[in-house]
Image: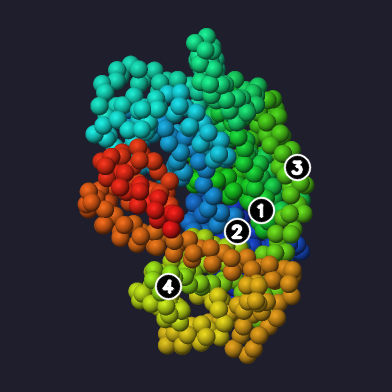
Amino acid sequence: MVLEKLKLVPHKPGCYLMKNKDGVIIYVGKAKDLKNRLNSYFHSSHTGKTARLVSEIADFDYIVVSSETESLILEINLIKKHDPKFNILLRDDKTYPYIELTLDNVPRLLIVRNAHRKKRKTRLFGPYPNVYAARKVVNLLNRLYPLRKCRTYQKRPCLYYHIGQCLGYCTNNVPKEKIEKMERDIVSFLKGNDEIVTNRLKEEINKESEALNYEKALELKNLLDDINVILVKQKIEVNDNIDRDIFGCYSDGNYLSVFVLFVRGSRVSGHHHQIIPLIDDEGEELTRYIAKFYEKALVPKEVLVSSIADSELLSDYLKIKVKIPEKGVKKKLVNMACDNAKKQLEDEYELVIKNEERTSKANEELKNVLGLEKLDRIELFDNAHLFGTYNVSGMVVFIDGMPAKNEYRKFKISADKNDDYGTMREAIYRRYFRVLKDNLVRPDLIIVDGSIGQMNVAKEVLDSLGMDINLVGLKKDDKHSTNALVTFNGEIPIEKRSNLFHYLERMQDEVHNFTINYHRQIRSKGLYASLLDDIPGIGKERKKELLKKYKTIENMSRQSVEELSTVVPKNVAIDLKNILDNLKEN
């Protein structure tokens, strides 16, 4: 059937959708020439992930478009819609931190993610692949330049004013010229001019030393060291001050290593790298990677790429200049990125192989142990409660051996009583009623963190919904370690330290931690409500403000009376602090 269908495919650009025997889309790709690309899958030899993909293809569809740019846009949209298991790259939900200097009359410095989604105009600097470094930069600038810290203006100066990190904009009339001078200094620094801040620090250090304020001078010296250590940047030979990203790559035939250099203000400000399994042509994979990269990162003025990428297509798609330099300094920079990509693959190859064994290969082993025809998607459930109260259940999802965090779900259970079976019954019903109602993807396997009792409850619910889904439980030994899979036909022992054991243990830890974290959130909110309702001076509005600002009871208990006083009157803050301290001690 597939070979006959291949004869009808035209020599035109478009997207193709590979399907398994159940009609599920397992891979989406694009091609300049659909016929040539599809023929390459079925008439050539393959290794690695590509070989595995081809072994599962039972059918395919294709969509012809009028241009390559249309095919790239369609490809990315189809992958988002169908989430095929072999399109691993586009499941990566990593975001990049940026530093934002807001455009308010009195601006604030913030760490933001998914910066490209911000609807309002703003000033963004980055990306900072190392979020620790980004926080250090913000903390440093906030100490040197006393901008506004509060989201909304308070009725009186807050703690930041008293420690010299805010000029008290809520009550003081600060000259606009002073604010604009701080803004200019900050922007200049974030664009790469380190001298403006280091010179100021040196002046302050000398000033404090001459006044014999040695402790203050030492504190400022430590800030200067932070700049020299954390913000160290490599000067490059291109002095045009254009923000650009440089993509290099290296492939061994099975994996593609991509290395990105971020150049801001004629300096290398950071880098990012990733190793991905090769399924498509190297050039197609790199082009797709770059297009996807800028869904979660800001597009700079210029992008330099390796010669295997489709620069014209990327230029049309990103609406900027994407160049393949052929000589000079820019060519050297691309070569440097490629050299780094090669080194990363060589250094991390063993780790990549081991990770493969512990994920997709372990998933394959689980499929064989249970005698399943396919095992693409697993959904796991766990419950948590506190003496029968704050009952919750959590569900995590693994696709082809890897966690799919955007698919995780939380269930706040309606009944407040110690009933694990009732909790399991409600969670399973709510989840799979929704799957039926919205025609969501069904899992190939459900795992409950329990034995035959929970399994019977889950099966009873699935039967009532008319759903036939494979179901197993996990049995633990007296050391609380998984030692067997529980099926309706008996137990299957698991060898300790095997890949399958580590795989099951990882899934069990993931669902347990996810559920416990949700339980803590629910419990904390419940404790908040009862605590705050009983404290004189805290009404509906003050309770709302406390919950909005501090989120968890642990976080609130760590605050000082002065900090709590920024939300409630000082006498109320003292009472609240005493109650929170007593709660911690007990």
Sequence-wise, which precedes: disc 2 or disc 1? 2
Mark yes or no: residue 449 visible. Answer: yes
Crowd band around label 1 with a 10 angstrom C-alpha radius: few (<14), some (14–19), many (20+): some
Q: Which mark is residue 209?
A: none
Image check: 228 left or right of 43? left
Mark yes or no: residue 54 visible. Answer: no
Give 119 or 409, whichever is nearer the viewer: 409
- Residue beneath label 4, please? 387
Residue at 70% x, 61% y is 356
Q: Which mark is residue 276?
A: 1
- Residue beneath label 3, please? 343
Dot 4 and dot 1 residues touching (CB under 8 Å): no
Q: Amino acid at mark 4?
A: Phe
Sequence-wise, which precedes: disc 3 or disc 2? 2
Q: CA distance from mark 2 to mark 4?
A: 41 Å
Q: Amino acid at mark 3?
A: Lys
Crowd band around label 2 with a 10 angstrom C-alpha radius: few (<14), some (14–19), many (20+): some
User: Element type at marker 1?
Assistant: strand
Q: CA distance from mark 2 to mark 1?
A: 8 Å
Q: Is residue 185 positioned above or below 574 on the image?
A: above
Dot 2 and dot 1 residues touching (CB under 8 Å): yes
Q: CA distance from mark 4 to mark 3?
A: 54 Å
Q: Position of residue 113 (x, y in %)?
A: 46, 43
Q: Amino acid at mark 2?
A: Ile
- Residue beneath label 2, please? 88
Which of pointers 2 and 4 indicates the residue nearer the eye?
A: 4
- What is the tally of numbered marks visible in this picture? 4
Give 379 or 555, whichever is nearer the viewer: 555
Quadrant of the frame with the N terminus: bottom right
Q: Position of residue 145 (x, y in %)?
A: 42, 24
